[in-house]
Image (spheres, rainbow, N blue to C red):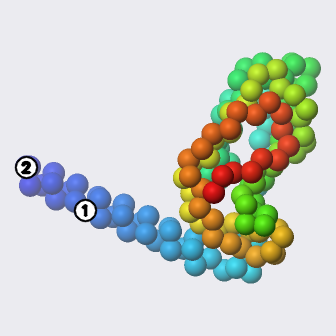
Amino acid sequence: MKKLIILFTAVLLAFSFSLSVYAKEKNQNHNSDSPLIIEEEITVTNEGGTFEVGFASIKFKKGFLNDDALPITFTVSIYAEDGEVYIEFSPDVEAFLSDVKVKATSFEGYLYDVSLEENILIQIKTQSLKVEHFSRYCWAT
């Protein structure tokens, strides 16, 4: 029975590893003719919540804005410019009642650089930002 469990675990690990290698190669060998910009719309209610956009997680606390301004829909874009990686929110919000947390998980892959007009290989380390308003922020690379 132990041998069967060990064999099953080894097969599962090998399968997981092969999938991760395939996904990484697929991303790194991406056709550079199509721009790779991560973009998603999120709608936040007065309950707040956490939203995943690409390799970013955006966490809103309950009461981050006045109830009369909610629900609100943001367009979140992640892209590169001059080799730097940005996360941009639209519409801009001048001030939150409580900070919003924006976290990036470690990521290596291609993103579209709007200044170079091509997809470039980027590397992002896990990092967090506490933001008092929305506009555009640069990730440390």
Question: Residue 39 falls in which quadrant of the image?
Answer: bottom right
State which tag comes first along the sequence, 1 or 2: 2
Q: Tag 2: residue type? A: Met
> What residue sits 82% from the left and 68% below the top?
114
Instruction: Please name which of the two marks, 1 or 2, marks the residue nearer to the observer.
Output: 1
**Residue nearest the viewer, comparing 69 with 130:** 130
> What residue sits 77% from the left and 47% below the top?
137
* Badge 1 element: helix
Residue 132's place in the image compared with 122, above or below, is: above
Q: Which mark is residue 75?
A: none
Report whether 4 appears left or right of 90.
left
What distance separates the C-alpha of mark 1 from that of mark 2? 15 Å
**Residue nearest the viewer, comparing 105 with 9:** 105
Residue 47's place in the image compared with 117, above or below, is: above
Q: Which mark is residue 11?
A: 1
* Badge 2 element: loop
The picture places residue 90, in percent across and down from the top left corner, at: 87, 45
Q: Residues within 10 Å of mark 1 (few under 14, many from 20)?
A: few
Which quadrant does the C terminus fall into?
A: bottom right
Q: Which mark is residue 1?
A: 2
The picture places residue 1, in percent across and down from the top left corner, at: 7, 49
Report if residue 48 is visible in the image. Answer: no
